[in-house]
Image (cartoon, rainbow, N blue to C red):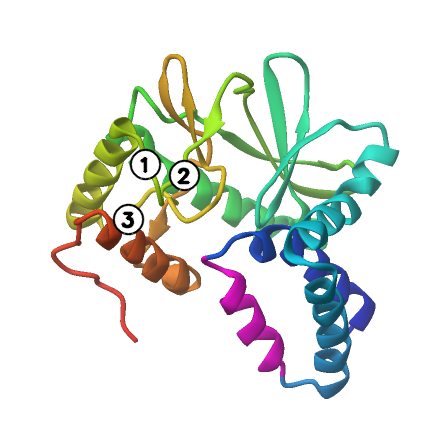
């Protein structure tokens, strides 16, 4: 196990999960339950430093740390997701770099690319006027062209404001209701837990993270529970939650 690499991954988590009130406690629990003592101590030291720095300052700091390699390589970073760094391609397009996939085998990259493309179809079908399609391919890892990773390309939405689902607009509330209905029908729901997955633009809501949360994917279970909490705050509840404890 490469402790330096593992701690480096935590930096990305602090910049994304640590900035998200829904996932912050999950991150704390994960670090405390790390079975490898040396790794647990190393992660705890980083996490303690982040908390001492203060939430806002720490989030900004770790976002800078997580993206500065891309900036040094000449890329303009315009966003971050849990698994992605978003860099500007030109005035119309962005590239989403799945930064944790650059060590994967070609076979694993191919399987995951196919899974993501299939998964987004449900969101594109349910929200054809709002969802911004993503192409997902195997491409060069921007920080090391000798490696390959998953890369998504998507239209650049530059005139929008991230939707706050704690205090949704009427349009966002309608979107939550439709999302709940989608889950009842399909067992999948748009990722309403991420902080900047849906934007309010002059032409209406735009979904830029088109990969839904699915009851069929165990990795989504915690996020799904948070999604149910968000829905419940506004009076919506799936008829069945589908996921097991």
- The disc label shown at residue 188, or none: 3
- In the rendered image, residue 98, in percent from the top left (x then y), is placed at 63, 44
According to the image, label 2 marks what residue?
Answer: 164
Query: Per the image, is 138 magenta?
Result: no
Task: Please tell me which of labels 2 and 3 falls first in the chain.
Answer: 2
- The disc label shown at residue 135, or none: none
The magenta stretch spans which residues? Answer: 22-34
Please name the residue shown 79% across and 37% down the image: 70
Task: Please tell me which of labels 1 and 3 falls first in the chain.
Answer: 1
Q: Residues within 10 Å of mark 3 (few under 14, many from 20)?
A: many
**Nearest to the observer: residue 95 or residue 200:** 200
Question: Quick one: SS at disc 1?
Answer: loop
According to the image, label 1 marks what residue?
Answer: 168
Q: Can residue 237 be seen in this view?
A: yes
Predominant SS of the magenta segment: helix
Instruction: Say if mark 2 contacts mark 1, CB within 8 Å.
Output: yes
**Nearest to the observer: residue 83 or residue 173:** 173
Please name the residue shown 57% across and 50% down the image: 82
- In the rendered image, residue 34, in percent from the top left (x then y), is placed at 62, 80
Please name the residue shown 37% across and 13% down the image: 203
Query: Per the image, is 30 magenta?
Result: yes
Instruction: Say if mark 2 contacts mark 3, CB within 8 Å.
Output: no
**Which quadrant of the structure image shows residue 190?**
top left
């Amino acid at each position: 196990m490469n402790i330096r690499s593992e701690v480096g991954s935590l930096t990305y988590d602090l910049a994304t999960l640590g900035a998200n009130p829904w996932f912050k406690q999950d991150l704390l629990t994960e670090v405390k339950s790390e079975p490898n003592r040396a790794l647990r101590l190393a992660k705890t030291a980083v996490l303690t430093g982040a908390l001492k720095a203060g939430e806002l300052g720490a989030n900004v700091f770790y976002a800078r740390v997580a993206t500065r390699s891309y900036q040094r390589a000449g890329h303009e970073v315009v966003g971050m997701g849990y698994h992605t760094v978003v860099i500007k391609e030109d005035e119309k397009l962005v590239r989403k770099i799945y930064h944790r996939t650059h060590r994967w085998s070609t076979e694993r990259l191919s399987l995951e690319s196919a899974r993501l493309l299939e998964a987004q179809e449900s969101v594109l079908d349910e929200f054809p006027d709002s969802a911004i399609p993503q192409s997902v391919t195997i491409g060069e890892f921007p920080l090391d062209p000798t490696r390959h990773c998953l890369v998504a390309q998507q239209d650049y939405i530059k005139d929008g404001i991230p939707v706050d689902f704690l205090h949704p607009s009427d349009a966002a509330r309608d979107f939550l209701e439709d999302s709940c209905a989608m889950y009842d029908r399909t067992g999948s729901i748009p990722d309403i837990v991420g902080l900047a997955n849906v934007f309010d633009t002059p032409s209406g809501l735009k979904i830029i993270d088109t990969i839904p949360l699915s009851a069929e994917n165990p990795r989504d279970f915690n996020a799904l529970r948070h999604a149910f909490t968000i829905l419940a705050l506004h009076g919506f509840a799936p008829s069945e939650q589908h996921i097991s404890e």
